[in-house]
Amino acid sequence: MKYIPVIGLEIHAELMTETKAFCGCSNSFGQDKNSNTCPVCLALPGALPVLNQKAVQLAISAGLLCGSEITPITIWDRKNYFYPDLAKAYQISQLYAPICVGGGLEVNGRYIRFNRIHLEEDAGKLLHERGSSIIDYNRAGVPLIECVTEPDIRSSDEAVEFVEKFRRILIYGDICDGKMEQGSLRVDANISIMPENSIALGTRAEIKNINSFRFLKRAIEFEIERQTELLSNGGRIVQETRRYDEVSGETFSMRSKEDAHDYRYFPDPDVLPLIISAEDVEEIRNTLPEPPNKRYDRYVNKYMISGRDADTILAERATADFYDAVINEGADPKAAANSIKGELLRLLGEKAVKEIPVSPKDFAKALELASNLKISQDGLKAAITYMFQTGEGIDKALKEKNLIITENQDLIKAVIAEIVAEDPDLATRYKAGENKLFSYLFGQCMKKLKGKALPQSINLELIKELTE
Ligand code: ADP
Ligand code: MG
Ligand code: ZN
């Protein structure tokens, strides 16, 4: 029997706020253990939570960018569970009235729906070191959105593309930094399979806390295979929570899946319901930056660059911002795209820090010089590399690398004469009709005159020389 995979994702994204969700502690990653803590996020007796408005704004922004409806009255629920990463023994979350409902994203022509996006606080982190366990509460209380899709995804590739697209939206919206390796973005994948013509969904397994695209793809594929084999052999899938082992590439059962009622959800009496007016929503909508899909349309339809190039430029926001800045300086969009793709990304690829040390103005100037044939294409590359590596401007680059073409007709003639003299037979054969030798001779001249003459001039001079 043929089975169809069914996948639904829960994406946890930590919000880029200054402070935590319900206290004034700093929300910064990589600090000394337990240094970002206070009575509220350590759950000391009597401490009361105060909602961070910025977190609300970012959660609404995420919803608006994905076409969700914003809930006018949002309430807070306690999700109770006992585990040392949670000092209160409950998490403040939203079950009954999530802040955003519906919406979705198109991936390769298929629309993947969001069920909801809700706001909650993160738990602390357990670190197991040398036989003992340490609890770090720096992450406890960090605001995050849990973004739950409908079970609309049908393959591992589609799941990866969906998360990539959503991640890009969050990064462009300054909502989440998207750093999966730091745990800012984590994915739970729910996977089931069903017989080809079935309308009823199968029993799902939930794979927790996947923190890279590669692992997401592999975990889903492993799980589809495991379930297919099980069902094909007359077995039965149990609803359970599994973890993905990065070394073996397999998933392992952790526990049977808990249901909502296991968490004894109830409204949190410490936090007041949040009332969001239509005006509030409009105000936030007006502050939204241009999302990556709109930028894509602008690049392809207005600047006429290829979809492939647009994607390459949009992959990192720093690159896209740089591209826009270069165009604002008056550069030709196509030339700018080519040089960014060809030179800049190659140079950036060698660096750990993705910061662009070239000013858009100097970059635009270099492009203009090349289009006016004041410097050669090789000279353009050299100028970009020099500016990138030294942090100097275009004027210094032109001078240091001697890039401005000052044509000297005598020099061109001399070089041609030299090349003909090296192998006089070539010229004779060309004159006798071996046309294809021209490009070889031309190439030799270009090599010797690199950066000192325009190709057009070399071409003219060489024709003159060879037809004399
Ligand atoms: P829970 O909170 O218990 O994990 P939810 O109802 O919120 O349960 O669903 C969690 C995720 O599981 C959603 O992304 C949903 O799309 C997905 N899901 C639900 N049923 C299935 C199924 N049969 N196969 C695959 N995914 C499913
Ligand atoms: Mg879940
Ligand atoms: Zn705190």
Image (tube, grey):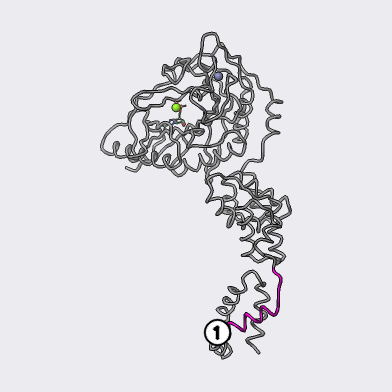
Main SS of the magenta segment?
helix
Residue depicted at 70% across the width and 66% down the height: 404
**Where is residue 243, by image quadrant?**
top left
Q: Position of residue 142 (x, y in %)?
A: 54, 25
Q: Position of residue 376 (x, y in %)?
A: 65, 66
Residue at the spot of label 1: 422
143 relative to 180, above or below:
above
Residue sitting nearer the eye, 231 or 130: 130
Q: Position of residue 304 (x, y in %)?
A: 65, 56
Q: Position of residue 134 (x, y in %)?
A: 41, 23
> Of the residues shown, which amino acid type is indicated by label 1?
Glu
Q: Quadrant of the N terminus?
A: top left
Taking the view exactly as shown, the residue that stands out farthest to the front is 400
**Where is residue 25, by image quadrant?**
top right
Q: Which residues are magenta?
A: 405-419
Q: Does the magenta portion include 129? A: no
